[in-house]
Amino acid sequence: MWWRGTGDIVMAQNAFIALLRERRSIRLFTKETIPVESIKSIIEAALRAPSARGLNPWEFILVDDPELIIKLSEVKPYGSGFLKTAPLAIVVCADSVKADFWIEDCSIAATLIQLAASCEGLGSCWVQIRNRMHDNEKSAEMYLQELLGLPEHMKVALIVGIGYPGEEKPLIPVETLQYEKIKYNRLK
Ligand SMILES: Cc1cc2nc3c(=O)[nH]c(=O)nc-3n(C[C@H](O)[C@H](O)[C@H](O)COP(=O)(O)O)c2cc1C
């Protein structure tokens, strides 16, 4: 690879681990507007996500309309309320007819969105939609399909809420990571 062995990539590797160390799920945001350049970086990260066979079955719906964001925050009885303080929410959905690996592809893209957001000094948090209910009758996905005009074959994996952090989260020390979960060659 053309970049292997250069000082730049060593720097970038360190920066990447630093980024991972600093990322925590943020569920409270300030009212500060997200700069257009930051949104562009986040979009680029999403669109660069690896996808099986390069099929890119995903679609990303950027929601910044405050009234719609409130509606998004009501998608589930639990775990989505925090979205109401987010200036931006990205609904990650995909054409399930195009690809049976849409869940994997959406999850990878969402991870990159969260890391790109961290890189921009923004906080973010994932809201699970797939297999979750809005209420006793309606799935969270159906609620969003109606709200956002999505056809039935467009499956909704998740929403990422994004904004400048309005809360501080402690960093997780490297010594507390679950290294016992790492095995070599065999599980036992
Ligand atoms: C698949 C997945 C689903 C999640 N769903 C939700 C959710 O619905 N609501 C929420 O507040 N956080 C959700 N989270 C965020 C996790 O709760 C969070 O990542 C976890 O507690 C670890 O904290 P950290 O991200 O600060 O390291 C989800 C995360 C993942 C990966």
Image: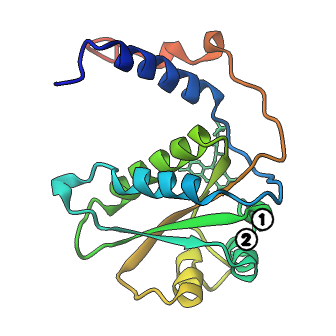
68 over 36 or under it: above or below: below
Find residue 100 and report its image quarter: bottom left
Q: Is label 1's Cβ within 8 Å of ligand 1?
A: no
Residue 93 location (% of width, % of height): 43, 70
Residue depicted at 74% across the width and 60% down the height: 33
Q: Which residue corresponds to mark 2?
A: 73
Left/right of residue 150 with respect to residue 82 in the rendered view: left
Image-based side of 181 in relation to 184, left or right: right
Query: Does residue 131 appear anywhere in the picture?
Result: no
Quarter of the figure with the C terminus: top left
Mark 1, secondary structure of its residue: helix
Q: Crowding at label 2, few (<14), some or many (≥20) Cα neighbours within 10 Å? A: many
Q: Quadrant of residue 39?
A: bottom right
Task: In this rendered view, identify the residue nearer to me: 177 or 6.
Answer: 6
**Rendering coords of residue 110 (x, y %):** 48, 53
Q: In the rendered view, tell whether residue 46 sits above or below residue 60.
A: above
Rendered location of residue 148, percent (x, y): 55, 85
Identify which amino acid the numbered label 1 is placed on: Gly
- Quadrant location of the N terminus in the rendered image: top left
* Residue found at x 24% / y 23%: 3
Measure how far apart labels 1 and 2 are at the Cα level. Answer: 5 Å
The quadrant in which residue 58 appears is: bottom left
SS of the residue under disc 2: helix
Q: Which residue is mark 1?
A: 81
Which residue type does callout 2 highlight?
A: Ser
Residue 32, x across and y down, in percent: 79, 57
